[in-house]
Amino acid sequence: MEIIYTREALTRFRENCKNLNKTIGFVPTMGALHMGHISLVQQAKKNVDYTIASIFVNPTQFNNKEDFNNYPLTIDQDIKLLIQYGCDAVFIPSVEEIYGQKGYHPFTIPLGKLGNIFEGEKRPGHFDGVIEILSILFQLLKPEQVYMGLKDYQQVMVVEKLLKHIGFPIQLIKCATIRDEDGLAVSSRNKRLSPNERQIALNLYKALSEIKENYQKSEISILKKSYFNRLNKIEEIQVEYIDIVDSQTLKPLKSWNPIGKNIVLIAAFVGKVRLIDNLLF
């Protein structure tokens, strides 16, 4: 596997692929890799000639300095994992390499209401940071496809808007959320949970599953209020939001959509660790 640290070397990698008429699949990450990331690499390898991941803990998408400082860094393990699963290259730039000595160069696009609800509301500036870093990486690499997991459902919608705005011919491949056997969505932040907190975190997926099971058996407003209150009664859990929305617009529902167009979104702190999840039904 080729390990790339600079913009110049990344450009050479891209040009070599293009000269060989090889397609590129891109898996952007912030490291602390888990099987969710690996599933993206595996999917890319089925579809393209060369698969490249990036590992960059982007400071511009953290609205909470403590969260940034506590983000797990496992570069050596990450590299070994990518090698094990056959990734062709990984880009591991420094902050200076990405943003230059003069610091950040803010770039954003009009997101409309999408940028002001749920994650946009709770993490102000987060999506601006996502847009900024991905616009840089897309410009440098120009992949044919980019692979992203649907656990970050709203973020995937933001990236769709970004690609339309900048007009790059990059296909966004949306991949299913990967879960552990007990149902917990895999996440880099899970590494910060104590064993007890991890058990408590299972209540989030349990709530999503029960809402799906009670589809059309109860009014939406009653379901949301019931599970919001139920989860908040559990020690160590603090719910930020739980809502049932249209899967295409994220507009909160007053009545049920046809099957496949309803999605329940949740964000909650388990101890000091903020987790998000969703379930489409």
Image (tube, helix red, strand yellow):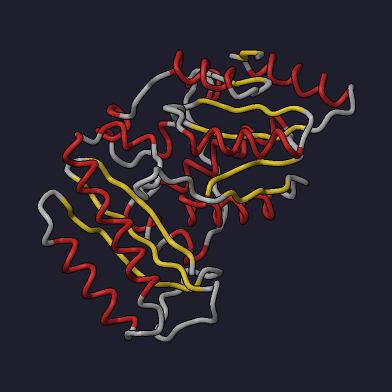
Residue 210 figure quarter: bottom left
Q: Which residue is found at the position 58% from the left and 49% from the top?
A: 175
Question: Between residues 187 and 216, which one lies in front from this camera angle?
Answer: 216
Question: Between residues 108 and 234, which one lies in front from this camera angle?
Answer: 234
Q: Is residue 34 left or right of residue 184?
A: right
x%, y% of residue 5?
59, 14
Asked whether the viewer can see residue 96, the reply is no
How many numbered marks are there?
A: 0
| Residue at far front of view | 181
Q: Is residue 141 left or right of residue 216?
A: right
Q: Up-down: is 12 above or below 130?
A: above
x%, y% of residue 202?
27, 51
Residue 277 figure quarter: bottom left
The quarter of the rendered structure image containing the N terminus is: top right
x%, y% of residue 216?
40, 84
Residue 243 figure quarter: bottom left
Asked whether the viewer can see residue 273, the reply is yes
Q: Up-down: is 12 above or below 44?
A: above
x%, y% of residue 227?
23, 69
Q: Which residue is found at the position 53% from the left and 59% from the top?
A: 111
Q: Up-down: is 106 above or below 52?
A: below
Q: Which residue is found at the position 51% from the left and 25% from the top?
A: 55
Q: Is residue 92 left or right of residue 275?
A: right
